[in-house]
Image (cartoon, helix red, strand yellow):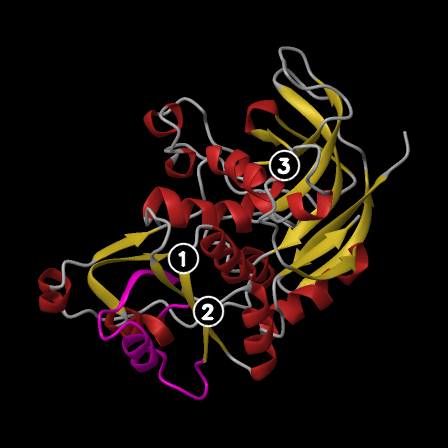
Amino acid sequence: MPSIRALQLLADRQVTVTEREPPAPPSDGEVQLRVHVVGLNHIDVWGYRGMAFAKRQYPLTVAAEAACEVVSVGSGVSGLQPGDRVVPYGALTCGTCRFCTRGQDNLCENVRGVRGFHIDGFAQDLTNHPARLLAKIPPSVSLRDAACVSVAYATVEHMLFDNAHLEPGEWILVHAGGSGIGSIAIRIAKSLGCTVITTVGSADKAAKAKALGADHVINYREDRFEGIVRKLTGKKGVDVVFEHTGADTWAGSLLSMRRGGRLVTCGATSGPSGSINLMQLFQQQYRIIGSFGSPLSALARALDRIAAGVTPVIDTVFGLADFQAGIERLESRNVFGKLLIEL
């Protein structure tokens, strides 16, 4: 049987395309997938740097996010057949704990790891995956757009609706509007008729964010964003802050919120530590919500939203051998939207 290609991390910051044996036929409850496109995310940067927060073995096939096609199905699988296009959920959850059974998969008590981070990921020609952890791609959604779903788009879906409960017509501050999740958040919020304020780090990104639909764009390198937000909102503040940058923006984000406002955060790329004035917290009745990943249901919702026309922003599509260039581009922040690798 011919070998398959796999993009593997050999050690911290050492990645190469290797040849490996193809997977065995899918077992009970599994399907075999042909991987077409994978997405790059900050979780890939962390893994590339060796920040896995758990034991793992090298070589490790990378990539936690993908769009695939079903090649074959194992016994006990229904509702899927060869040729179906699917998005796999990257966390290998148990499916039986109290959280999994009530649809909170990202709180699974017995998760076996995240693909591409703790265990082999999707940057390979063929792979097996549990059939229950797949979402079908609607016919009108491209594989490239679908490859943005399981980590980036679904994370935003979960943050905005399951956690922040964003409503039409509200004001929202989206940090790092040029990032993969920031650009998606702008598009989703605008599709609801929200007023969107976003922060970016350059004039070029400011122009792109404006073209994307942001109502107000603030270059955080030139202005204190919280002061401008207060002016724009008549000193009231925004209803929702979409936070994922961490230490550098934390204090300003709190000052940007209206009384009873909601802050939802999923990241800390500028540092993990921030302080909070407890009197400010309870007097202003803020709601601060941590958000990590998404439940499986968010993948289907994200795909439906893309099918309705709220597509992700794609910056660059690389080849399989250009993973390191993609990671370096992501690390440099010289990106607007999502980075993809096409197999």
User: Would you call the spot at circle 2 few (<14 residues within 10 Å), some (14-19), or many (20 or more)?
Assistant: some
Q: Measuring 60% from the left and 72% from the top, which residue is drawn there? A: 208
Q: Which mark is residue 55?
A: none
Seen in the picture, residue 4 relative to 315 is either above or below; the reply is above
Give the mark, 3 or 1, whose residue is nearer the N terminus.
Answer: 3
Q: CA distance from mark 2 to mark 1?
A: 9 Å
User: Would you call the spot at circle 3 few (<14 residues within 10 Å), some (14-19), or many (20 or more)?
Assistant: many
Quadrant of the snapshot with the N terminus: top right
Seen in the picture, residue 222 relative to 7 is either above or below; the reply is below
Give the mark, 2 or 3, whose residue is nearer the N terminus.
Answer: 3
Residue 120 in the figure: left or right of residue 159: right
Q: Residue furthest bottom?
A: 222
Query: In this rendering, which labeled residue sits more in front, label 3 or label 1?
Result: 1
Give the mark, 2 or 1, whose residue is nearer the N terminus.
Answer: 1
Residue 333 in the figure: left or right of residue 339: left
Q: Measuring 57% from the left and 57% from the top, which residue is drawn there? A: 47
Q: Position of residue 216 (x, y in %)?
A: 44, 73
State yes or no: residue 180 in magenta. Answer: no
User: What kind of residue is marked 1?
Assistant: Cys
Q: Which residue is mark 3?
A: 87
Q: Residue furthest right?
A: 2
Q: Position of residue 73 (x, y in %)?
A: 71, 18
SS for dot 1: loop
Q: Which residue is mark 1?
A: 194
Q: Which residue is mark 2?
A: 215
Q: Position of residue 228 (x, y in %)?
A: 34, 80
To which quarter of the image does residue 146 belong? top right
Which of 269/67 is in front? 67
To which quarter of the image does residue 189 belong? bottom left
Q: CA distance from mark 3 to mark 1?
A: 29 Å
Q: Which residues are magenta?
A: 219-246
